[in-house]
Image: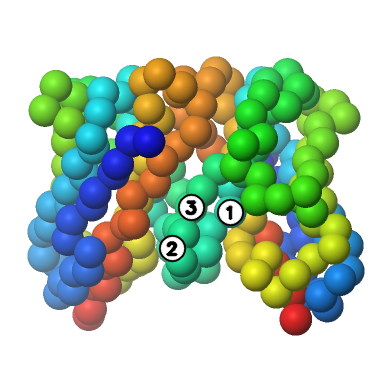
Amino acid sequence: GIQVEQSPPDLILQEGANSTLRCNFSDSVNNLQWFHQNPWGQLINLFYIPSGTKQNGRLSATTVATERYSLLYISSSQTTDSGVYFCAVPPLASGYALNFGKGTSLLVTP
Amino acid sequence: DAGVIQSPRHEVTEMGQEVTLRCKPISGHDYLFWYRQTMMRGLELLIYFNNNVPIDDSGMPEDRFSAKMPNASFSTLKIQPSEPRDSAVYFCASSQEVVDEQYFGPGTRLTVT
């Protein structure tokens, strides 16, 4: 199946700092989602972004499908941004399942 | 509109007991997915339904697991008999189309002792 690799695996930021998370995938995709899993375990939708760039407040995401990667930007980080960020893609041939990366664990300190 | 609803939120049971997890998808969503999250395997798809019909159950770990969707607003995932290795967080998700944004419920944390 399609491989999803996220980097970095762990990240510690001081409040107010900016960061970029990366997601590489091994095959063509027809959509891509970014999730934030908060410390309570809830999976929160951040972006549905098969291609192009989207912004939502301090967060933005860019997917370059032809080069098989997506980036998640977090600006002016806050302690509430802590948690695990997952990238998930369905394979083009069978677009039903979401293959999740292993995630980037982010800790934002005061 | 309410999001995906799952119950119970936490379940602790003894090995050998039957466990039933419940899910109510977002109204109007034709696709329902069951995922499991463990430390070892991360998030993985178990089964998905389209218009209440199971389409692919290849991710169901073994015959002890079964899932049903009797109507468009309700699905169950049953484990019988449960084993300690079934301990995990089970998520239900739904979407309008198969290639579409999926929305996840809060999950059920299952502990089998």
Query: Of the residues tagged 3 and 2, which is closer to the observer?
Result: 3
Marks 1/2: CA–CA distance: 17 Å
Q: Is residue B4 above or below residue B56?
A: below
For label 1, the residue is B36
Element at badge 2?
loop
Q: Residue at x 77, y 24 (%)?
A: B52
Quarter of the figure with the N terminus of chain B: top right
Question: Which badge, 3 or 1, is on the more N-terminal residue?
Answer: 1
Element at badge 3?
strand
For label 2, the residue is A38
What residue type is disc 3 on?
Answer: Leu
Residue A110 vs residue B45: left or right?
left
Query: Of the residues tagged 1 and 2, which is closer to the observer?
Result: 1
Which mark is on residue B43?
3
Q: Quadrant of residue B89?
A: bottom right
Query: How dense is the environment of label 2, judged by Cα within 10 Å: few (below 14), some, or many (20 and up)?
Result: some
